[in-house]
Every structure is written in structure tokens, then in C-alpha cells.
Image (cartoon, rainbow, N blue to C red):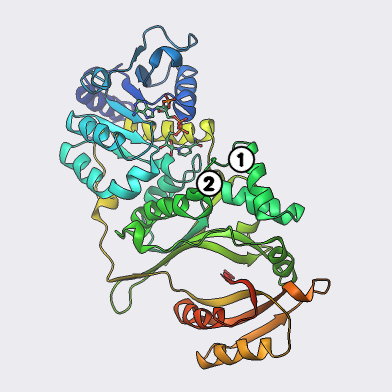
Amino acid sequence: MKKSRSSKTKTARARVAKKSGGADRKLKIGLIGFGTVGRSVAKILAQDSSGPLLLTHIFNRSIKKKKIGSLSSHIRWTENIDDVLSSDVDVVVELIGGLEPAGEWVRKALRAGKSVVTANKLLISEQGPELLDLARKMGKRLEFGASVAGGIPAIIGIQEGLAGDRLYKIAGILNGTCNFILTKMEKDGTSFDAALKEAQSLGYAEANPSADVDGMDARAKLLILIQAGLRLRVRSEQIPCRSISSVAAVDFMYAAGLDCTIRQISVAQKQTNKGVRLAAAVQPALIPSASLMAHAQGSQNIVTATGEFGGKMIFSGYGAGGDPTAVAVISDLYAIVRSSGAPVEALPGAAEVPDSVSGDFTVPHYLRFVVRDRPGIVASIAAILSKYEISLDALLQKPGFPHSALPFVMTLEACDSAVLDRALAEIARLDFHVEPPLCLPIFLD
Ligand SMILES: NC(=O)c1ccc[n+]([C@@H]2O[C@H](COP(=O)([O-])OP(=O)(O)OC[C@H]3O[C@@H](n4cnc5c(N)ncnc54)[C@H](OP(=O)(O)O)[C@@H]3O)[C@@H](O)[C@H]2O)c1
């Protein structure tokens, strides 16, 4: 006999109730870390008290200083992690950040039979596949939607919305600090140092900005996207990073003359002819001014995923901040409610190790030199490029600069970046440079 819709719903509810121990039982949540994101998660959960999520524990060190009166009096505030791990919470939300003790506590939570939601990009990029294996073994969920691009549903979109495609390229602007600095330099013509100082004074950049400007933060996120979208397992040190700190205001002038601008671009491309090969890098690059990536302003992020069947998909929005990131955390909690905590198969743990990984892309390039002017400079650079069979596309020189430190730009036709690196090492040894040459790839699509 055919079942009615309402009896089907009742059966589903009964299934959830059976698993969770009661028809009206809520998913109990223990929050580890009551900082920027933790506070926003608690605030949003408190505004949805009739929903299926119930915050029961909040853990942080020096908890007395953290406690706020606006949350439910039923919440247990603690500075003892075992109070959360040995409690009856269904899901532990890890928001302390860093590799340890976060990793140890996530493993303990999974082994204690709890699902875990985390926003920790460092932990997932370094240990994601192992933690997913453990979650599967324990029959629990590990969700990490907030670990890449904050509030943008890129992970869930790629893993679930695009599960039917075969993705071969992921690219994006994954670091809001770099995007703030580069868009500031573009708009106001300021130097890198001045834009960085402003980012620091506004709280967008750390006192030590290296993880952001040198690319390691974006690389951790790219690694997670490679696992989730391209289903490849690589180590962070296999993906080269180049700093945005050598980009100067003059580069934006030259880029504009090419109808381009400059952004920190994270890109990973998978090729499957002759084995599985991955090309991936995080670096400043020229992109067309008319492209969507160029329109990501300030701390916005953008992620594009290109598949064999569906073509290019774009996710964009605010990649950081307490509230946007908390939205991604809570969406992960709802995903666990919908699945009744059942583990999802075929997630990144099943990723394969590629046969080769490199940072080489065959694309046009932009070279900027600052030289002590004298005759024959262009000819000597062109001679070395020609030796490596690299073709010059255009030569650009703006007036108004002193002969003692004269900037000029060469654009090159598509060439392999590894070959170009060898040519540049030779060019850099010539004696007319005032500063090392800057080489940026030009990504036209
Ligand atoms: N903020 C964002 O925009 C954003 C965006 C995407 C992802 N995320 C990720 O979200 C996570 C949390 O970031 P957040 O910005 O909320 O960081 P946060 O403001 O620094 O908060 C972390 C909290 O955890 C506590 N904590 C850290 N280590 C601890 C330990 N060993 N024992 C006890 N308590 C500890 C801190 O206590 P104290 O205050 O005493 O230090 C702080 O309250 C990180 O993994 C981050 O990468 C953040």
C-alpha cells in the first residue's frame, strides 16, 4: 500500500527520535572557544531558541572573564575541557583555533561519540583526511564549512551542490587581508607598507602579517578546497606561495594599462591525462579588471569551481568576521540535524594522492624591472628570454621616473612558469637592477 505524505514524515521523525532518544529532543551543543566566532555562534543560537539546536556548554580558559549574562541560565560555563567531552552533548563546536590542543580535543570528542563542527582551517588543512576517517570509524560527522571563506557556503556548495560534477579547477581570493591591502593600493595609489599599516590599524591584519601577506593562510584554505573539490590529498609544503609584499603602486598603473588589476590568487588545477597531476599556487597575479575576482572589494572572498559538465560556478561574499563565520558553523549544525548525525561517505578522506604536484602554470606573464638606466638593458633581457624560447609580447614604460631607478614592464606570451623562473634567475644576476625583478602570472580566465 502507498504511504501518505504525513505518515512518511512521521516515520522519518520517529527514526530521528529513535536515534536521538526522543521526538522533541534537541541537538545538544558544547562550544569550545568563546572568542570572536564563538560569541557570534552563541548569540545566533540564543535568538533561535525554538529551533532544534540547544547550546548547553561553553568552554574557554579564564571563563569568569568571558561569561555574559544575556545567554540562557541553563548553559554550563567551564574552563575544564572534560566537562564538555564527558557530557551528553551531541556535537562539539571547536572554535579555539590552532593545531593543538584543538586537534587533541577534536579527536577526543569524536572518540567519545560526538560529532564535531570546526572553523579551524589550520587543523583541517593539516589533518582533515585523518579526522574524517576517525569520524567515519566512529559513525559521527565532522563538518568544517566555516574553515574556508568564512560565511560563504563554498565547502557545502562544492561537496554537496556540485557532487554530481567532476571538478578540475578551483580558484579564488581566499584571504581578506591581502584583498583589503591590494584594493587599497589600487584605489588610493598607496604603497604596500602604507596599506598594510592601515589594515593593521583597522584590525584587518595581525601585528605579524606574514601568514596573510606571504600566502600561508590562503594556502591552508586552498588545501581544504583541493581535498573537498578536486578530491586530492596534498601537503601544504607542496604548494608554493609568493608574497604580495613585492607588489608596488606602480604595478597597478601598468596593470591598468593592460585592462587588468592585481590580486592574491589561489589556484589549483587537476589534469588526468598521463596520471593525476596537480598545479597549485598562491601568489599575486594580474587578472582582467572586468572579471568577477577583480570586483571582490576589501575583505570579501570569492571561490570559483570549474567542472567538466557544469562549467564555472562562483561563490562570493564576506569571508571573515564573527557573524558571517557563525552562519557557516550553524549551517553545519543544521546539516547534522538533517542527517540525524549519520556519517557522510565519499567526503575528502577518500581523496587520492596525485602523481605529481607543482606550482607551474603555462600562462602569459608580467615582468617589472627597476633599473639604473643605460643603453642595451632591454636587449640583454630579451637575449636571455630568447635563449629559453620565451616570447616577448609588449614593452611598457611610463614617463616621469628618474634614470637612477627607472621602472619598465615586459609582458610575455604564455610560457611555463618553471622555465621562466630559470630565465629570471639569470636575468636577476645582470648588474643594472635597483631591486629584484617582479614576475606575476596573468590569469585571463
Ligand atoms: N574570526 C574570523 O573571521 C574567522 C573566520 C573564519 C574562520 N575562523 C576560525 O575560527 C576559529 C576561531 O577564530 P576566532 O576569530 O573566534 O578566534 P579568537 O577570537 O581568538 O577566539 C578563540 C577563543 O578560544 C580561546 N582559546 C584559545 N586557545 C585556548 C586554549 N588552549 N584553552 C582554552 N581556551 C582557548 C581564546 O581564549 P582567550 O581569549 O583567553 O585567548 C578565545 O576566547 C579559528 O580556527 C579561526 O581560524 C575565524
Percent of width and height locating residue 231: 32, 58
Kindly identify which residue carries mark 1: 200
Image quadrant holding the C terminus, namely: bottom right
Tell me, for residue 312, which label it has, or none: none
Q: Tell me which label, 1 or 2, sits earlier in the chain.
A: 1
Kindly identify which residue carries mark 2: 209
Local packing at callout 2 (Cα closer than 10 Å; few below 14, some 14-19, many 20+) is: some
- Does the residue at mark 1 contact the one at mark 2 (Cβ under 8 Å)? yes
Ligand 1's quadrant is top left
Percent of width and height locating residue 380: 62, 90
User: Which element carries disc 2, helix, strand or loop?
Assistant: loop
Report how far apart the C-alphas of labels 1 and 2 lie in the structure: 9 Å
Q: State the residue at coordinates (31%, 60%).
A: 232
Tell me which corner region of the image, top left, top right, bottom left or bottom right, holds residue 333: top left
Identified by mark 1, the residue type is Gln
Percent of width and height locating residue 298: 64, 46
Decide if residue 397 is on the left or right side of residue 434: right
Identified by mark 2, the residue type is Pro
